[in-house]
Image (spheres, helix red, strand yellow):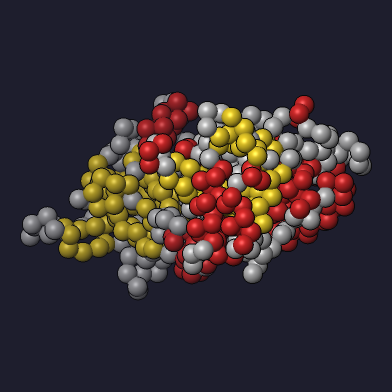
Amino acid sequence: MAKLQIFIPVVTGPPEARETRLWEVRCRYATLSEQAAAWMLDDKKIEPTVHPLGKFNRYKSGFKALGAVRRLLGNGSDGPEGQADDLEDALRNRRLVSAEGAAWGDKIEEYSSDLGLGLILLLDLMQAKGVILAATGALGDAQDADSADDLPVMPVRDIPAKLQAMLDKKRGDGVLKQLAIVFTPLQYYAGDGELALVETLPVIGELNNEGVAVHPVRSFGEAAKILGIAPTAHARLRRDLLAREARRFWLRLAAFGLPLAALLAVSANLAHFLSQPIALQWHPMTRTAPQGEPYLLCFDAQGQAASRLALAKSGPAAEPVAPVSSRLAWEMRTGSLAEAARWQNKLLRWLGYRGYHLAVVLVGKDSGITDNAVFIPKQSANSDAPARLPAGSVWNYSLSLDGKAEESRLVILANRLQPFDSEALKSGLKERFKPQDGGLDLPAVEHYLAEQANALSQFTLQTRADAPGCPARH
């Protein structure tokens, strides 16, 4: 049998209806998150080893048990420097817990669980296996101890009832059928607080007949010695214990470090991916159009979009021209298809990333920064939510040109993570670019906007009253 089990007998209920239970306690290795929390909080008023017992009102009892183990294994004063700190590391990595979440834990007699809690912690540190025992008894103070590395075991109540309960369990079919050893104090409180010797109880003989050895002990160290853990050998015990702790630490570090290294590598790769410029590309009006750029959107007599018309070109530089009153439309691919296919983009979408944030700026050389110069495009005519464009998608949009005849610049801004504030952009433009003779410096406006976004694409056009436009509506 490889399992280590320790039971603490508990007597509950009123005198006329006393009930005896067996509380199983365990010691487990703390999880990484529990260890991290303990070290980050570093609360000197709370012992991580016994903190889980607080919910059962057993924290003080666990604190006493922890002190007994510390004393038994040595405080480091007679060993190499740093030894005590190593022992504290081992103790901080353990957690004393209840095996069955006993809701009646607060009914345990004050400190009667000290001895059992100390033994489960000690046996876990020593990696004991195949031990099933029960223990009841309080632990006394250091000034009453016979040696500097021990604590006395003090009397508690109801020991006859507790031993009888263990005898009944031993004769049953449960795990206590394997019970072979019980620890108690030398004395117990009988009647009105009078002390009596445990060894005189008749139930001890019955337990012995069932193969259970009852050991009334004077101290915690005496119980440890019966279990093969001699206080005088604490230096060797510490050495073996700390060697095991070192091996366990490196194994856990490897188990934790490899996934952490992979996570850091993924994070670094993802950060590099997010730092790359966003590709913004105008799409041609039709598949046969020679180049990609905005176009005019034409409407029929019912006001429905009916056709598209390429912008006329004028002047030596073949500058696009549009009527002062018309509808400028465009199709734009945001992010490349190659970017859309990369695993980083797929991971971001799986994590909830919905695409690039957008802003549209339309400024005229003579009109300057108007109230309608900057806006955030919406998802659709029926939604006021800002548009978000996944990588590789094609974006269709249009706006009205209702200004004067002048040179204008359409600027599309894109951010990966940070949404745009249209009012902040507008205020920044108005503050930086005041009306002046010669009109607005459009290249300077574009340069300023480029500093506010991850990516920018611009289109320059001339609005004229005589520019060719859409055919008349019929």
Front one among 192 and 451 = 192
Front one among 358 and 264 = 264
Q: Residue at x 45, y 30 (%)?
A: 428
Q: Residue at x 12, y 55 (%)?
A: 303
Residue 10 showing in the rendered view: yes
Locate residue 456 relative to residue 468 in the image: left or right: right
Locate residue 431 relative to residue 469 in the image: left or right: right
The residue furthest bottom is 288
Relative vertical location of residue 23 with respect to residue 70 in this rendering, above or below: below
Locate residue 88 relative to residue 196 in the image: left or right: right
Front one among 235 and 230 = 230
Q: Residue at x 44, y 60 (%)?
A: 349
Q: Position of residue 49 (x, y in %)?
A: 64, 43
On the rendered image, what quadrant is the N terminus found in? bottom right
Relative vertical location of residue 250 with respect to residue 59 in this rendering, above or below: below
Front one among 457 and 198 = 198
Q: Position of residue 379 (x, y in %)?
A: 29, 52
- Give the total number of marks visible in the rendering: 0
Q: Position of residue 452 (x, y in %)?
A: 50, 40
On the rendered image, what quadrant is the C terminus found in? bottom left
Q: Looking at the rendering, which quadrant does residue 288 occupy? A: bottom left
Q: Residue at x 80, y 44 (%)?
A: 73
Residue 267 showing in the rendered view: no
Q: Looking at the rendering, which quadrant does residue 393 occupy? A: bottom left
